[in-house]
Amino acid sequence: MAIESSCDDTSVAVIHHRKILSNIVATQEIHRQFGGVVPELASRAHQKNIIPTVDAALKKANISLSDLDAIAFTQGPGLMGSLLVGVSFAKGLALALGIPLIAVNHMKGHVLAHFIDNQDRQGKVLKFPFLCLTVSGGHTQIVHVKSPQTMENIGITIDDAAGEAFDKIAKIMGLPYPGGPEIDRLAKGGDPLKYQFTKPKVEGYNFSFSGLKTGVLYFLRKEIQKDPDFISKNLPDLCASIQHTIITILLDKFEAVAKEYGITQLAIAGGVSANSELRTRLVDLGKNNNWDIFIPKFEYTTDNAAMIAITAYFDYENKVFVGQDVVPNARLKT
Ligand code: KG4
Ligand code: ZN
């Protein structure tokens, strides 16, 4: 059984070999009214949700606690208060049941979600090594995935993450949190080339998104002075243009890395991998370059415990366990 509590979703999954028997996600609605995650409220909600979520996951998997062979949990990266709830609960349960504990890196979990159920949906099976663009609310990474245990970051963001850029720009436009899915939805009727925003100039394969956020803010301020209803009148075009800019920044670098490294298997992961433009443009890029593209199932893109369970499964096979002295690490590196 795996527990994920790094941010604002309490999730519990049960895995049997590579098959997910249950994957329950309790989303914390409380943060919506604040336009972002409030850490203290998140940890309190995790405390409230964890037992019912464990119960629901066991029930759905049709097993009881005594059937479990190991307990896995997200050690980091994430919010310290949130992580503490999952880590403490997992430690207590493992101790009570006398079974091993497995500590999982959340970012590795996003990447390894591709191995759930031996996914082979595009008629292909993903093999090591491959490249993964991991794009979430907290991270933006191009990862060289050499094995379940060995992953190397080729590029990372030097400021905001891609999901954070979606969320912050959405907030500027008065859209609800999380802004990524809202922008994606509203962009559908819009013209992606209507507004041009300056793309960052960052050396090598690193990313930067905070300049884009400021650029959008100044542009909107100027336009609102001329017409106070500018945003509402042009919302689809604005969303489509902003989304197009973010996805172009991501894909330009991902393509360049694939060409330099000569790797022909490309995967995406993390909450932003749910984005429809990212998905379609990456598939087109694959067709043009003869690359195999791997896109996770929708339910395994945003935070979930199934991805923690599959990562733990690899460790379980290799008997990589941790002791009761394990602690959460808010800044755990890949
Ligand atoms: O992986 P995730 O659930 O949590 C973190 O570990 O951060 O990612 C959440 C992020 C949020 O920033 C959200 O706006 C973004 O993923 N997101 C999207 C979409 N769905 C979720 N961004 C763009 N388009 C989407 N369809
Ligand atoms: Zn995540």
Image (spheres, rainbow, N blue to C red):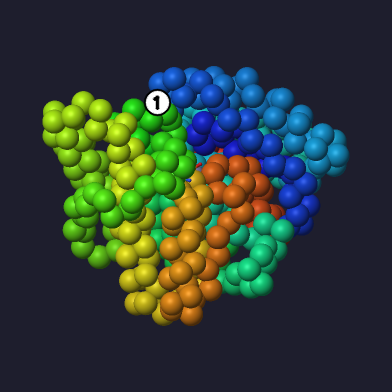
Task: Identify which residue is drawn at 44% across, 57% down.
Answer: 278
Task: Identify which residue is drawn at 64% across, 24% down.
Answer: 49
Q: Quadrant of residue 79?
A: top left
Which residue, given by chain and number where applicable, does mark 1 sit on?
A: 35
Q: Quadrant of residue 332?
A: top left
Q: Nearer the viewer, residue 333 or 11?
A: 11
Observer able to see residue 333: no
Task: Identify which residue is drawn at 55% across, 42% down.
Answer: 303
Q: Residue 145: image x %, image y %?
A: 49, 66
Q: How packed is label 1: few (under 14 Cα within 10 Å), some, or many (20 or more)? A: some
Q: How many marks?
A: 1
Q: Residue 94: image x %, image y %?
A: 72, 37
Observer able to see residue 4: yes
Q: Quadrant of the N terminus?
A: top right
Query: Please, what is the three-letter code of the amino acid marked with disc 1?
Result: Gly
Q: Quadrant of the C terminus?
A: bottom left
Asked if residue 49 lies left or right of residue 106, the reply is right
Q: Nearer the viewer, residue 28 or 58?
A: 28
Task: Identify which residue is drawn at 43% across, 30% down.
Answer: 177
Q: Nearer the viewer, residue 147 or 96?
A: 147
Q: Residue 253: image x %, image y %?
A: 32, 65
Q: Residue 149: image x %, image y %?
A: 55, 61
Q: Is residue 139 above or below residue 124?
A: above
